[in-house]
Structure formats: C-alpha cells, structure tokens
Image (spheres, rainbow, N blue to C red):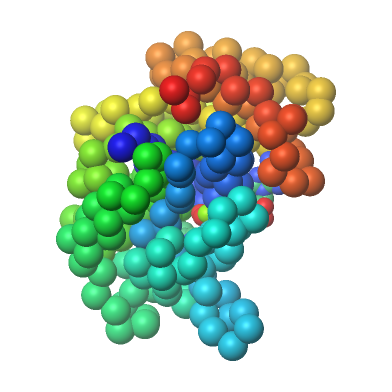
C-alpha cells in the first residue's frame, strides 16, 4: 500500500482541492485509491445531518461515505482539540490508526488529509497533526499557496516537519495565476532553494478539479 499525508502551510491553502486533484490522477491511472480525513472540524449541515465537507469534495471523484472517509466530524470551525471539547468528544489517535489500517486492506493508495497546518493540535498540545502524520508512517506532501507570503510559511512548515523526523515527499504549490506571474515563478525557485524539497506540482486557480491544467513535475503516483 502506498500513500501520502497531505498537510499544508495553513488552513484553507487547498489541501482538499489538491487531494481531490491527486485522487483524480490516481483514478485516471486505474489505481485503487481513496482519501481519508481523520478529523474534520467545521462540519456542514446537509440534507438533515452533519457532514464532512472535505469528504464531500472527494465525492466529486470517488464513491465514499463519511463513515468510510472520516473518523471524527466536529461542528465548530476551529482547531480540532477545541472543536472536540465543545462537542464533548475525546479524540483517540488509536482509532484513527485502526481506521487507516482498514483502508489499507482495501486500497492500494490512500491520501490522508490533515487539519489546518502541521502544528495544529489534534488532541491537545501533546498530540498535533505532526504526531498524527508520524503515527501513520506516511511521507508528507505539503500544500502551499503560490502567492506572496508563501516562502516564509513553507520554509517554517518544512523546518517544523523535520524536527519530527517526517519524510517530506514534496511540495504542491496551489492557486497560480494563468499565466504565472514573476513573483509566483520566483516563489517556486526560492522555496526549492531554501527547503531542499522539490516542488512536485503546480496547480493553477481552476474552476474544477480537471487534470488538464495541472503541472505534475514528478510522477508521484509511481
Ligand atoms: N486551485 C484552486 N482553484 C480554485 N479553487 C481552489 C483551489 N484551491 C483551493 N480552492 C478553493 O479554496 C477553498 C479552500 O480550499 P480547501 O478547502 O482545499 O483548503 P484546505 O486547506 O483543505 O482547508 P482546511 O484546512 O479547512 O481543510 C475551497 O473553496 C476550495 O475549493
Ligand atoms: C476549520 C478549518 N476549516 C479547519 N478544518 C481547521 C483549521 C484549524 C486551524 C487551527 C490554527 O492553526 O489556529
Ligand atoms: Mg480541507
């Protein structure tokens, strides 16, 4: 079984969008793939129940229920540790590991999406997204914005990941202008130079998750 843990330089950087684009690529290559959102905060009320909006996005590409694609659905749009406290839920990392093991028995490729950025508390200050990535023993993909501000955020995220001994497979930069502007072009160069981590994908601002506009600079699916 192969897989990646998809983290980001922040919340709202496009982890779900990029995960769904990567799923699209895997499915097009006839690879038995799925995506998994262990902890969803900021649940949405839809058709009479609370749903996981990130899993709802995955459903644009794969058939997956919330029960299959998410372990904890929490109502408040905030850090999972607080959202869980507000909902009276105790997040148990071993439940997430067990959920992932079940997916690994069925699928050949699993994309796991974190929550917010890599230093976000899942349980509390002693169990963060970084700890969860380490527990699942998956290489990281870091989703980063294409625009101004991304150099600092990305360098800090890479450095923080390295303190946890996490293997970083690559960076996917998201939300480019079409065509890329001079700042965005230099952001790619400077981020690779400063982090030593390859930018393996460039995703423009798109209206859908169609594959045609994406530049994959490495064949990460192999
Ligand atoms: N390349 C893109 N083109 C167009 N829209 C995008 C792109 N990337 C992200 N978006 C949109 O930006 C918003 C935030 O993206 P997304 O939900 O993927 O962020 P996230 O990092 O997964 O956030 P969270 O931390 O809540 O999981 C969404 O509405 C998404 O559809
Ligand atoms: C609600 C949001 N969309 C994400 N699901 C959770 C983001 C947590 C961010 C915590 C923080 O960095 O302050
Ligand atoms: Mg998301």
The residue that appears at 59% across and 59% down in the rendered structure is 59
Query: Of 98 and 166, which appears nearest the observer?
Result: 98
Q: How many marks?
A: 0
Q: Position of residue 208 (x, y in %)?
A: 75, 46
The residue that appears at 40% across and 40% down in the rendered structure is 109
* Position above or below: 150 against 66: above
Outermost residue, bottom side: 48
Query: Of 57 and 205, which appears nearest the observer?
Result: 57
* Position above or below: 181 against 121: above
Q: Quadrant of the C terminus?
A: top left
| Quadrant hosting residue 25 | top right
Q: Position of residue 140 (x, y in %)?
A: 37, 34
The residue that appears at 26% across and 32% down in the rendered structure is 166
| Quadrant hosting residue 126 | bottom left
Horizontal arrangement in the rendering, residue 71 relative to residue 217 (left or right): left
The residue that appears at 74% across and 30% down in the rendered structure is 212
Horizontal arrangement in the rendering, residue 221 relative to residue 178 (left or right): left
| Quadrant hosting residue 183 | top right
Q: Position of residue 182 (x, y in %)?
A: 75, 17
Query: Of 184 and 100, which appears nearest the observer?
Result: 100
Instruction: For residue 120, say whether it is visible.
Output: yes
Q: Position of residue 215 (x, y in %)?
A: 66, 23
Q: Quadrant of the N terminus?
A: top left
* Position above or below: 185 against 88: above
């Amino acid at each position: 079984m192969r897989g990646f843990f998809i983290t980001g330089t922040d919340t709202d950087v496009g982890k779900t969008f990029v995960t769904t684009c990567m799923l699209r690529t895997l499915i097009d290559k006839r690879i038995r793939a799925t995506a998994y959102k262990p902890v969803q905060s900021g649940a949405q009320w839809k058709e009479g129940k609370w749903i996981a909006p990130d899993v709802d996005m995955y459903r644009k590409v794969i058939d997956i229920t919330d029960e299959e694609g998410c372990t904890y659905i929490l109502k408040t749009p905030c850090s999972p540790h607080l959202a869980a406290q507000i909902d009276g839920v105790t997040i148990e990392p071993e439940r997430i590991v067990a959920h992932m093991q079940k997916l690994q028995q069925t699928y050949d490729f699993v994309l796991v999406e974190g929550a917010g950025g890599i230093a976000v508390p899942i349980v509390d200050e002693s169990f963060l997204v970084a700890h969860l990535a380490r527990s699942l023993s998956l290489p990281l993909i870091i989703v980063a914005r294409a625009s101004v501000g991304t150099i600092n955020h990305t360098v800090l995220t890479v450095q923080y990941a390295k303190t946890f001994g996490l293997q970083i497979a690559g960076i996917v930069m998201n939300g480019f202008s079409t065509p890329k502007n001079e700042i965005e072009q230099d952001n790619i160069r400077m981020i690779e130079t400063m982090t030593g981590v390859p930018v393996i994908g460039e995703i423009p601002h798109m209206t859908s998750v169609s594959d045609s506009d994406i530049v994959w600079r490495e064949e990460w699916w192999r």
